[in-house]
Image: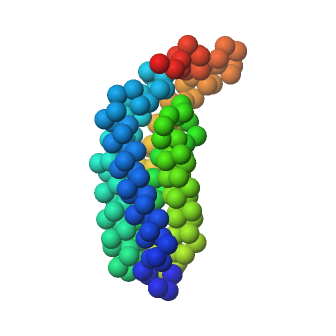
Amino acid sequence: MSDTSLPRWQVASTVAMLGLSVLATLVGLLRPGHYRDAAVTLPQVYGQDVVTLGVGVPLLAVGLWYAARGSLRGYVVWLGGLAYMLYTWASYALMLYFNELFLVYVALFGLSLFTFVGGVLRADPGAVRDRLDGRLPVRATSGYLAAIALFFAAGWLAEIVPATLRGPPPRASDSRTFRRT
C-alpha cells in the first residue's frame, strides 16, 4: 500500500454501508414484528442490532475517517470494521427468516465483502508489521483469542460429542426449539 489513502470507490462503498447499516438496525430495533425468526433467536438478533449500531457503525466510521486521510492505524481499524460488517450482514442475508429488508442485507453483504477483499488486497503487511512491531500486546491477545476459542469449543462440543457417541441428536437441534414465531 504505497498510497495510504483510500480509493474513492472504497470510501463510497463504506459510506453506503454505514447508511444502510443504520437503516437496517433501526428498522430491526424499532419496528415491532420485523424479525419473523424463532423466539429463541430473537434476543441474539436484537443484540446484534444494538452492537452494530452502537459499536460497529461508529468503529467503521472512525476507521474510514482516518484511513481516508492516510493513517495506517485507521486503515487497520477500517479493515476490522469491515470484517465485523461482513460477518454481520452475511449472517443476516443467509440465516434470518425472509423479511422486507432481505435485499438490503444482501446489498450490505456484497458491499462489505468486496470492500473488505479490496482493502485486504491493497494492504501492505510489511508496512503494518514494521509500523506496529513491538507495540502490540501479542501474548495477551493470543491468550484472549485462545480462551475465546476454547470457550466456544466447550459450549458446542458439550452437546455434539455426547450426541455423536450415543446417537440422539443434540438438544439444540430439536426442531421444536427453532420454530418460527
Q: Residue at x 41, y 31 (%)?
A: 34
**x and y, in percent, of residue 37 in the image:** 49, 26
Q: Residue 144 or 172: which is nearer the viewer?
A: 172
Residue 158 location, quadrant: top right
**x and y, in percent, of residue 5 in the image:** 42, 80
Q: Residue at x 51, y 81 (%)?
A: 1
> Left of 125 or right of it: where is 138?
left
Q: Residue 32 or 72: which is nearer the viewer?
A: 32
Residue 154 seen in render: no
Residue 178 seen in render: yes
Give the number of callouts: 0
User: Looking at the image, is 127 positioned above or below residue 27?
Assistant: below
User: Looking at the image, is 103 positioned above or below residue 170?
Assistant: below
Q: Residue 162 or 169: which is nearer the viewer?
A: 169
User: Looking at the image, is 56 positioned above or below residue 93?
Assistant: below
Q: Which residue is farthest bottom?
A: 2
Residue 51 location, quadrant: top left
Q: Residue 158 or 6: which is nearer the viewer?
A: 6
Colouring scheme applied when the structure was drawn: rainbow
**x and y, in percent, of residue 73 in the image:** 37, 72
Q: Residue at x 52, y 69 (%)?
A: 119
Q: Residue at x 56, y 69 (%)?
A: 118
User: Looking at the image, is 58 positioned above or below residue 152?
Assistant: below
